[in-house]
Image (spheres, grey):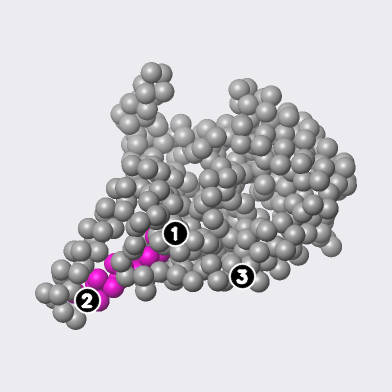
Amino acid sequence: ISKRIYQSGELIFEEQPLVLAQFEWNKLYKYSACEYCLYPLESCEQNVRRLCQDTSIVIQHPECDPNQTISQRIVRCPQCNEMYCSTKCYQQAMTNYHSVLCQSTENEKKDQLIRHIIDLWRSAHPPPETTSITLVLKLMAMLKNSNNRLLLLQELQKFSQGVQSENQKFYHKLLRKEFQSQVEQLRYALEQFNEQYMQIPEFKWFLTSDGFRQLLALLGRNQQGIGTSSLAIWVKNCENLSKTQETTAAAAGGAAGSDISQFIDAIYTKIDDVSGEFIDCEGSGLFKLQSCLNHSCDANAEIQYLHNNSTLSVVTTRSISPNEEITINYLSECDRNRSRHSRQKLLQENYLFLCQCNRCVSEASEPDETSEEEESENEMDED
């Protein structure tokens, strides 16, 4: 609840995740990011060349790319070669979980089991991805390293609210019947991992049949997507440069701005042709404060990643009055303009509630039909 007046575009708060992980397919396809904070580890030029599969591309205004020298700043784990954007991130990862999960040559059987768990997850959860089994592995390792396991478990349990249906069964789309076999294989593999290598008694319940369903429902309902990109930052800096040039020299600045805009448009067109919609380094995390924000289809705030890493920022999208609830939209950009029925169907499937926000109430007279976009997608799936 807002305690004061907020203007549109104002930062409300920032937050670090309790735990985060890059998506498994995203990582497999060499979207290079810091293992701890997801900061991109490519220069813009490297990023564009990979996404376009064209090594001849040379970006304009390289001074607008803060990652020009990123290859010189990368810190690697000496045991497994995992990459980090800084010594600070590497040390924090080692303290929290990486000392346990590091896939060195010291324990090949343990490393094989970790890889088996990740492979099982990939087979059950192809792109577009929404969460990662590595979140579970990291939580286990954090418990292993923690001096206060009870406190960490209590924090984790806070995310469990609302992951049960009316008949008290844990529910999420990841737990539908078609995934039953893969979920059981994952549960068993993680149970073996705990018994053989982690030995965390406090986590055993989460690896029972009901406990694991609660854990997956918890992650599916509460995790927040994270996206970072060298290209996006370069584009933003180029746009700011064009605005400055236009202010100081209208004629020359206008031409330069037009040139860079055309270059950027051409890059995005080629990326769309070659790589499709998968542009960013992507992952997800659990954020304690952000998870308390309720949904509204007419939200007054939004999630941004202003630092191009996992630091989450909540920013207003319009002015907010004192005592007004701060809300965000849980739906993706492309789903927000769908019909009331389509929005409610997506929210029920992913977050287990029937939305009754002001927008949904005002559209209550609309027929309970899916939007044209959804019907088109369903027809394509059937074909």
Q: Can residue 379 be seen in this view?
A: yes
Q: How crowded is mark 3: few (under 14 residues within 10 Å), some or many (20 or more)?
A: some
Q: Does dot 1 land on a helix, a strand or a loop?
A: helix
Q: Quadrant of residue 331?
A: top left
Q: Is residue 226 magenta?
A: no
Three-letter code, disc 3: Ser
The residue where tag 1 is placed is: 46
The residue where tag 3 is placed is: 86
Q: Position of residue 247 (x, y in %)?
A: 19, 78
The residue where tag 2 is placed is: 245
Is residue 365 or residue 379 the one in the foreground? 379
Q: Is residue 264 above or below residue 380?
A: below
**At x 76% / y 65%, what residue is drawn?**
95
Q: Residue furthest front?
A: 56
Three-letter code, disc 2: Gln
Q: Position of residue 177 (x, y in %)?
A: 62, 22
Nearest to the eye among marks 1 and 2: give it.
Answer: 1
Lower position in the chain sequence, tag 1 or tag 3 = 1
Q: Distance between the residues labelled 3 and 2?
A: 34 Å
Are dots 1 and 2 in contact, CB under 8 Å? no
Is residue 50 or residue 297 the one in the foreground? 50
Q: In this view, does 376 lie to the left or right of 230?
A: left
Q: Distance between the residues labelled 1 and 2?
A: 27 Å
Is residue 120 or residue 263 the one in the foreground? 263
Q: Where is residue 32 in the image (x, y as percent from the top left)?
A: 54, 55
**At x 27% / y 53%, what residue is drawn?**
266
Three-letter code, disc 1: Gln
Q: Is residue 37 left or right of residue 340?
A: right
The residue range painted magenta reads: 232-246
Are dots 1 and 3 in contact, CB under 8 Å? no
Lower position in the chain sequence, tag 1 or tag 2 = 1
